[in-house]
Image (cartoon, grey):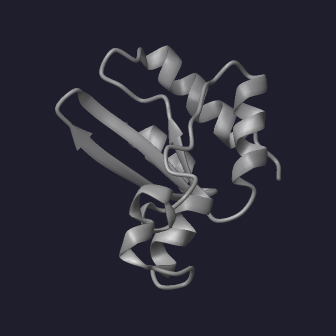
Amino acid sequence: MDDFIIATLRYGTPLVYVTMAGVLASLRVIEHRDRLAEHLKQNGIGTKVYYPIPLHRQQCFEYLGYKEGEFPESESAALETLALPVYPELTDEQQHYVVDSIRSFEP
């Protein structure tokens, strides 16, 4: 996992969330998130943007009356966060492939 974190630091700050099912890693990419996602897709690596709309701006929470700009960190995270394929069954070879693919990305 150390190599993974070192590689991701080149383009963003890694955020790792520990869940009951294992580890879910997401990468905070300040710039070029969508281009990085496309680069990884072209290399056969799936990614996901789990919350493209911050929770306070989702339709199900409209009744709370929050406006754009009231939660700037949440709004930034929605634009910058990319989930990466990191899970307990990921082999060392697969992990290195993800790392190498991130390292080869040129914005």
Residue at horizontal 63 percent and vertical 24 percent from the top: 45
| Nearest the eye: 2 or 51 | 51
Against 106, residue 3 (above or below) is above
Against 18, residue 67 (above or below) is below
* Residue at the farthest left position: 20
Give the percent coordinates (x, y) of residue 50: 49, 43
Taking 98 as reference, is 58 left or right? left
Give the percent coordinates (x, y) of residue 9: 54, 56
Residue at horizontal 57 percent and vertical 79 percent from the top: 68
Taking 38 as reference, is 62 left or right? left
Give the percent coordinates (x, y) of residue 44: 69, 18
| Nearest the eye: 99 or 37 | 37
* Residue at the farthest right position: 107
Question: Quadrant location of residue 99?
Answer: top right
Residue at horizontal 79 percent and vertical 46 percent from the top: 35
Question: Quadrant location of residue 88?
Answer: top left
Figure disc tally: 0
Which quarter of the figure is the N terminus placed in? top left
* Residue at the farthest bottom position: 70
Taking 69 as reference, is 63 left or right? left
Residue at horizontal 29 percent and vertical 47 percent from the top: 17
